[in-house]
Amino acid sequence: MQHFQAHLHDEAGTAALGAALARAISPGLVIYLHGDLGAGKTALTRALLHAAGHVGTVKSPTYTLSEPYAIQLDGRSVSVIHFDLYRMGSPEEFLDAGFREDFNGDNICIVEWPEKADRVLPAADINLFLTVAGNGRDVELQASTALGNSCLQRLKFAPNM
């Protein structure tokens, strides 16, 4: 399985990685974002969505738990659903909200704080880890499925050294 590691020197590096991911994603992809508060999970998602063609605000779904966005991929309308499960009290809340239905092979689902629903959340295609390192971030992407593997194979990103 594909694996990718880099150091992002600043917020621009995080935005550049989000833009590179936007060029590599495909329908049905599930990405888990791991990292402490302030690690850049929402900033990365915002950059991905803007690079994928979303015009407008991308807000953190901390209180709404999920925010859907429509983008075009290869001339096809695709929904990207950004989840932030930080405020969930239990995995059952994920089920009660009906979120499992969003993981349908067509939508792209990006999940912050996936451990909050770990027993009920569908498996990730890519696990992305962001760690604060000085003024920047260390990032690691791990594919865990064939779909995640093909996404990381398409990923063209070279951080500024």
Image: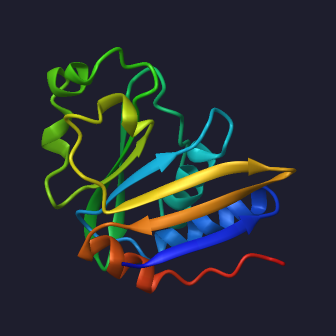
In this rendered view, identify the residue nearer to me: 106 or 145: 145
Q: Is residue 150 left or right of residue 42?
A: left
- Where is residue 21? Give x, y as percent: 50, 70
Which quadrant of the rendered structure holds the C terminus? bottom right
- Residue visible at 44% across and 19% down in the picture: 87
Which quadrant of the rendered structure holds the N terminus? bottom left
Q: Is residue 56 left or right of residue 8?
A: left
Q: Is residue 101 left or right of residue 108?
A: left
In this rendered view, identify the residue nearer to me: 59 or 32: 32
Image height of 7 relative to 40, above or below = below
Image height of 56 relative to 126, above or below = above
- Residue visible at 19% across and 44% down in the picture: 102
- Residue visible at 44% across and 66% down in the picture: 142
- Where is residue 106? Give x, y as percent: 18, 61
Quarter of image, res 98: top left
- Where is residue 90? Give x, y as percent: 29, 18
